[in-house]
Image (cartoon, rainbow, N blue to C red):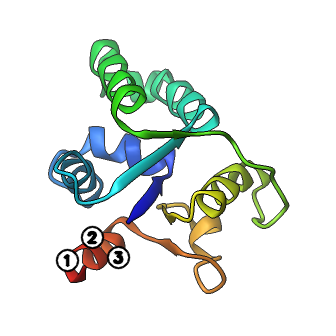
Amino acid sequence: MRAVLDANILVAALLSPQGAPAELITRWLSGEFELVVSDGLLAELERVLAYPKIRRRIDADDAASFLELLRASAVHASDGARRRRSTDPGDDYLLALADQEHAYLVSGDGHVLALADELPIESARSFLDRLDRA
């Protein structure tokens, strides 16, 4: 099973080590699913981790280590061709990435989750439940 974790899920994993997003990272590292990333996703994550309000809660060394872990250990894919699907066009690259890689998209973003009836998109908790059933 493959999954693309939205940047909001990745940041949440760092902010709350006991939450569902952090459990997803633990389960990825234990080999329960393949995590797919792209240059676009890593660039967005790097931007978000540099925001002052995030930097106050996640120190620069921890952010850099997490990015390095993702670069070294996740499946790296090219950013796919985007087509307009979300009401927030900034999310379309994630939809394209998940689609081209035949992966679930795991997100906490309402604009993305609104498309769950049309595409394989799940919340962190829902994807954890899927892993439990597999």
Q: Residue 30's spot in the image, x, y percent?
A: 16, 50
Q: Are the two marked residues, 2 and 3, in contact with CB atoms closer than 8 angstroms?
A: yes
Identity, as a three-letter code, of the amino acid under mark 3? Ser
Q: Are the two marked residues, 2 and 1, in contact with CB atoms closer than 8 angstroms?
A: yes
Location of residue 119 by image quarter: bottom right
Instruction: Tell which tag, 2 or 1, sits nearer the viewer.
Output: 1
Label located before the other in sequence (3 or 1): 3
Q: Residues within 10 Å of mark 1 (few under 14, many from 20)?
A: few
Identity, as a three-letter code, of the amino acid under mark 1? Asp
Q: Which residue is mark 3?
A: 126
Q: Residues within 10 Å of mark 2 (few under 14, many from 20)?
A: some
Nearer-the-camera pick, 6 or 55: 6
Q: Residue 78's spot in the image, x, y percent?
A: 65, 39
Q: Which mark is residue 128?
A: 2
Q: Which mark is residue 132?
A: 1
> Spatial distance from mark 2 to mark 1, Cα to Cα?
6 Å
> Spatial distance from mark 2 to mark 3, Cα to Cα?
5 Å
Identity, as a three-letter code, of the amino acid under mark 2? Leu
